[in-house]
Image (spheres, helix red, strand yellow):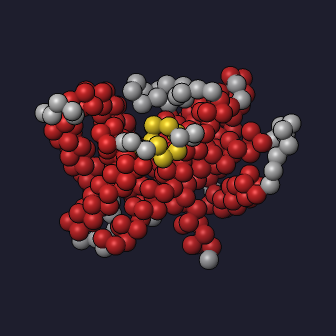
Amino acid sequence: MSGLQVGQLAWVAAALLCCGLMVLGGLMLTPRGRPLAKSLAGSAGSLVLTMGILFAAFLGGTWVLGAFFLALAVRVGFEAGKVRLGEEASKVLALGAGGIALIAMISPIGAIALSGLWMVLFGRLIGLSWSAESRFQPFVELAVYPVLPVALLAHGALDEGLRPIILVAYILIETFDSYALVFGKLFGRHKAFPQLSPRKTVEGLFGGAVILVLTVVLVSTAMSLPPVGAAGLAALVGILGLAGDLSASRLKRVGGVKDFPVVLGHQGGALDIFDSWIAAGAGLSLLSILFVLS
């Protein structure tokens, strides 16, 4: 997929968005689907706006893209900090997240160091127990997600070789999430993560995964790309994206909130919008760094 161009991906995203709007229109024609279509209409409009801003940033060149990801890192740091640490600490975390993202974007060595730090902190978080009085656990948790991941996502997006794959990951995430939501609303019966994310159902995740794989195979075949490799990338992105979604859900549950501070109606905060992409993009950036080092 290294031969893909951002302009090509913009057309692919537009085509997939049109397909999604057609599905929404089809739901409007059925008694069972009409209420769902009406409830999703606002979210569809917010998605169109989000995609427009994102693709404008990617098409705008390195400086525009860098400014977008710097703003995203600051906002993500603020939202996570406000939910987990409180109003005052959120401002400090926002500046820290922005500074870390800037290092990742301008310094390859810095990105490598941040990747190593991410793996060490992740291992510490899951491998060792914490005392109930530990002051460091919240900061380690916020570093593991979302501060270091959004910095690595920014690094990958600024890397011209990796940039199309990072954008592909966004398209895959939105495809999976959108159809998982539709299938979950229509057919969901069994909760996949009842404690962490009660709205996710096994049926929804399965339906979203099936549509994602079919979409990837059809699009990759039409673009003369290897469908098996494309399906493998979709599976990896889907798993990483789900991990990001659940990480954001856990952060909200620990903070006792339903949504992060709102930036866009019907979609919530930047972390509500980009939670899955942050994890998936960071994972792809980390794998790219490890591949180069090996």
On the image, the x and y values in percent for residue 144 come to 67, 49
Identify which residue is drawn at 31% across, 73% down: 226
Q: Position of residue 71 (x, y in %)?
A: 53, 36
**Residue positioned most to the bottom:** 294
- Between 250 and 168, which is closer to the camera in this rendering? 250
The reply to whether residue 99 is visible in this rendering is no
Image quadrant occupied by the N terminus: bottom left
Judged from this view, the residue extending furthest toward the front is 189
Quadrant that contains the C terminus: bottom right
Image location of residue 230, percent across then percent down: 35, 67
Point 65% across, 40% down: residue: 97
Give percent across and percent down for residue 205.
Answer: 40, 50
Q: Which residue is drawn at the image coordinates 28% and 49% (left, top)?
A: 13
Q: Nearer the viewer, residue 223 or 60?
A: 223
Does residue 148 sit above or below 220 in this rendering? above
> Is residue 202 toward the left or the right of residue 17 in the image?
right
- Residue 22 occupies which quadrant of the picture? top left
Task: Say which of 9 and 264 sits in front.
Answer: 264
Q: What residue is drawn where x is 60% and y is 69%?
A: 290
Please state the total of marks drawn on the protein image.
0
Q: Of residues 2 and 244, which is closer to you in this image?
A: 244
Is residue 144 at least partly visible in the picture? yes
Question: With 133 as the anchor, is 184 left or right in this view?
Answer: left
